[in-house]
């Protein structure tokens, strides 16, 4: 399926954000993740639990069941499962059946997100969850409230959107316009499973957006507009801003603003999108935080509208004009190949 | 298609309930039955007529036509058919055409239901319609008003729902809870095309539901919880209640309550469901009838919600975890095989 | 696909009406035509422009872009195209890319309609657009305002609807009933790519509709009820009315009323329908024009309801009863073969 030439939809060996921490409570809810229903709730210690969301008996979605202590009782014939996914009771017989069990997803709560591992649980190494501090979370940066968006488009389009930030001045031009953000050539650097696309501009006129971020911004700024791809589940992006370089040395550091984008496939044609924006400057400025949050939501919705409009056309992929790429697509195409390699390496 | 391994959707050689008597009047309406549109109306004698619902000319649904005497005139080019489905007039030519005719479905009105035969009309023996009296209809039992439900699930799931009444205490636990109804082992008895699943409990504590049915119910009751499968079109189920057996003899008979469930496939993934609840005790108690009717509707809707939630997942059958059965599923699995045998025996 | 036995959906070598003139303005909009999104707007001279509606870069629908002078800038990464469909700017690089270009559809504005050519632009001969005067447009006849209808049915059904006007007295019997319009045998005459079906009635009782058209209509009229098929994109139809013939000579000419029907496939199962009704009598009678316009809309909607009801059944074409034709279907079947021949002749 576009944009891949391999017939697999999801990278399974990965941690993904399943939900905002605030979405998961004592009361089981479910969400479709990588095609499967996942039941999410918290046990009596407050720890998140993620289990297959379909009863293996007659496949009632367990969201229609009820919590019994820390266990979940199916709403159809009352078969009950513990937080490990083990069947602990079958009402019509004395003993539970071992054949009835739910897949238990490894989970981990980081910052305000609940991560799950969608591959073989034996491979679920929490150290594979990206360090949140590098994008300004779990440290002393300031972050906007975490938001959840449902996206009516395949996850790969969302990833590639982030790897070509030249779109900002056009799709989000109401909020941010900066010619340096598209005119400066983009470079790619790979480091293992991560990949950094950046536009380094030693000196350019500061934009309205810069002056909004840094009211004392000089006329000329130096910037590094970065997108850091950390795998199919997480990418962050944003500008590192300084005063323009002068006399061969870097100018004064002004600050960094990153948007963290956690992307989780829902179905082959839709996604979950969790995002927040962080900054290391004016961290106590509540008014700025609020304006930023409002802008975040507006900007994300512009992405959603555009990607859904493209997705709506992809249903007739066979009769579409072929996609034509330009130089600025190199980072996106690079990451596309990285993910395609992982899809190809997966057992069918 | 689940749960069958044969590629046929419907048992055709059967009578099915097409509609409530009250749904069919002078004014032709249609309903999709076993995949086909069926036009339903009453002739001037008040007798029900069931014809193929599509004009054979350019296939306009005949519900958009109009009644002319006892005939039906197509709303597009005016071709007219009599109650036998014969073409009696083609406006653009002097003579009607024999090649234009509608399939006429044999029909029979029993109790407050209109039955149709969906197989070869030559095989339509009215004696194959189940005797309604054995489930408390057309005799001196009391019955709640007949209700119609549209079910967004394949008919077989509705049939199997009824063959495992252990679900009652869980799915309908707001209304009926009785441990005897799931703890007692179920037995199956086959007699030709019919099959009876029953849970016989010589003595158990009477439940709130028993005390509601029989205000003078003793502390211990003996019950026989029965599901009688009469073919793909009709199943009835309910408890036969006595005082608990004592001294080796049966206790005093208290009464029987049956729910009759007429189930008619609409499409491979949806069904029509006609039901009523009958009883042979407190037959004059109008207040009880009304409470029972209210509860009926609530309980049926719980079934509808559960089955539709399962059906919604079956669209992606290939990627679902397999169904796992327990001992209590034996009657359902038995009936599943009976129906699969009938499907397999049908011409392709 | 029904009613063709060839696996091609659209006759591509044709002019089709894309839009009403009034629908196309400075502000680009799109419409799906023969399966493809087409962007429509007017340049600064007011001339209509029709371009492929998807950006070739990442295939954002260009309706989400914006007009920059006479050019269109894509709303995603700002790539810009001129009215010829040529890429004139790629923001991330100095030079535009020749590989990025939009299909430019030849267009022509006639009467109040914008026509586009959906085949190879090299073959777009404006002389192939039917002469509008023969159906009473672009001359001194009077025409009702042009209307647009979306039809939830394949275009061929709309064409065939017009080639069997016997449907008028039945589907539109609320407005027009005239036995001569179905009882008179229909004849077909082919002349190159056009085909005329007509019912010539030397003398028949004038109908309510005749008397509404011609308040002084005599009791007996002679009429020629014609459908002129000019290709898959355009058909017109209506009665030519005289006083009844007497003494072997034609009676006095009363007038002609034609409905022009421009039909454009949207998808294999839906269509665009542009229509107007013309007349060469009482051309100054504004009250009559208004009544006719009101009736037009009502009559078209009756067609829409009927055709959509048929289309809804065709989704399960395999299990439908076969279509049965009568003599009056000859013109429709004749035209069906003409179109099928054109489909078959097209490169796959
Ligand atoms: S479907 Fe869950 S217990 Fe039966
Ligand atoms: S479709 Fe019924 S008469 Fe033509
Ligand atoms: S999709 Fe149009 S410029 Fe990228």
Image (cartoon, coloured by chain):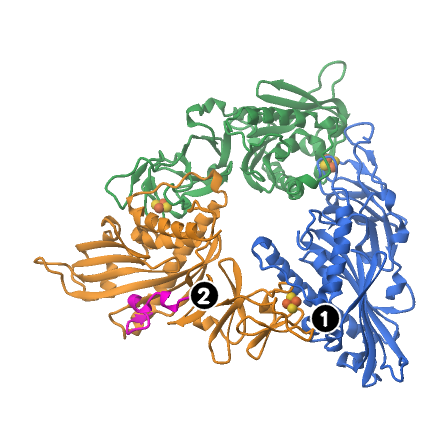
Chain colours: A green, B orange, C blue
Does C3 appear above or below A79? below
| Chain designation of label 1 | C
Q: CA distance from mark 1 to mark 2?
A: 36 Å
| Chain designation of label 2 | B
The kind of secondary structure element at disc 2 is helix
According to the picture, the residue beneath numbered tag 1 turns out to be: C166
According to the picture, the residue beneath numbered tag 2 turns out to be: B122
Tell me what residue is drawn at x 32 percent, y 63 percent.
Answer: B259
Local crowd at mark 2 within 10 Å, few (<14), some, or many (≥20)?
A: few
Specify whether residue B131 is painted magenta: yes
Specify whether residue C294 is painted magenta: no
Q: From the viewer's side, name the closer residue of C291 and B154.
A: B154
Q: Residue furthest bottom?
A: C219
Q: Which residues are magenta?
A: B121-143
Percent of width and height locating residue B171: 35, 52
Q: Quadrant of ligand 1?
A: top left
Displayed quadrant of residue A148: top right
The kind of secondary structure element at disc 1 is helix
Q: From the viewer's side, name the closer residue of B165 and B1.
A: B1
Q: Are marks 1 and 2 on the same chain?
A: no
């Amino acid at each position: 399926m576009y944009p891949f030439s391999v017939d697999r939809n999801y990278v399974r060996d990965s941690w993904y954000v399943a939900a905002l921490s605030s979405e998961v409570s004592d009361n089981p809810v479910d969400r479709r993740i990588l095609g499967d229903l996942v039941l999410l709730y918290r046990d009596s210690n407050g720890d998140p639990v993620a289990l297959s969301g379909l009863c293996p008996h007659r496949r009632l979605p367990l969201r229609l069941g009820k919590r019994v202590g820390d266990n979940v009782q199916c709403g159809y014939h009352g078969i009950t499962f513990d937080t490990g996914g083990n069947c602990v009771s079958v009402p019509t017989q004395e003993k539970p059946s071992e054949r009835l069990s739910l897949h238990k997803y490894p989970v981990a709560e980081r910052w305000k997100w609940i991560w799950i591992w969608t591959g073989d649980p034996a491979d679920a190494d929490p150290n594979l969850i990206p360090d949140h501090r590098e994008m300004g979370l779990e440290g002393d940066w300031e972050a906007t409230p975490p938001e959840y968006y449902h996206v009516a488009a395949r996850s790969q389009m969302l990833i590639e959107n982030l790897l070509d930030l030249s779109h900002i001045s056009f799709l989000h031009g109401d909020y941010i316009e900066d010619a340096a953000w598209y005119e400066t050539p983009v470079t790619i650097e790979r480091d293992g499973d991560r990949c950094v696309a950046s536009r380094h501009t030693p000196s350019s006129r500061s934009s309205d957006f810069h002056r909004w971020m840094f009211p004392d911004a000089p006329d000329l700024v130096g910037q590094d507009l970065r997108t850091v791809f950390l795998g199919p589940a997480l990418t962050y992006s944003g500008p590192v801003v300084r005063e323009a370089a002068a006399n061969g040395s870097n100018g004064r550091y002004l600050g960094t603003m990153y948007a963290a984008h956690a992307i989780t496939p829902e179905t082959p044609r839709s996604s979950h999108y969790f995002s927040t924006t962080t900054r290391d400057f004016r961290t106590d400025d509540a008014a700025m935080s609020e304006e930023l949050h409002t802008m975040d939501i507006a900007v994300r919705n512009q992405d959603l509208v555009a990607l859904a409009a493209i997705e709506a056309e992809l249903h007739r992929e066979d009769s579409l004009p072929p996609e034509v790429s330009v130089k600025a697509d190199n980072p996106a195409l690079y990451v596309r190949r990285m993910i395609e390699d992982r899809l190809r390496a997966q057992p069918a």
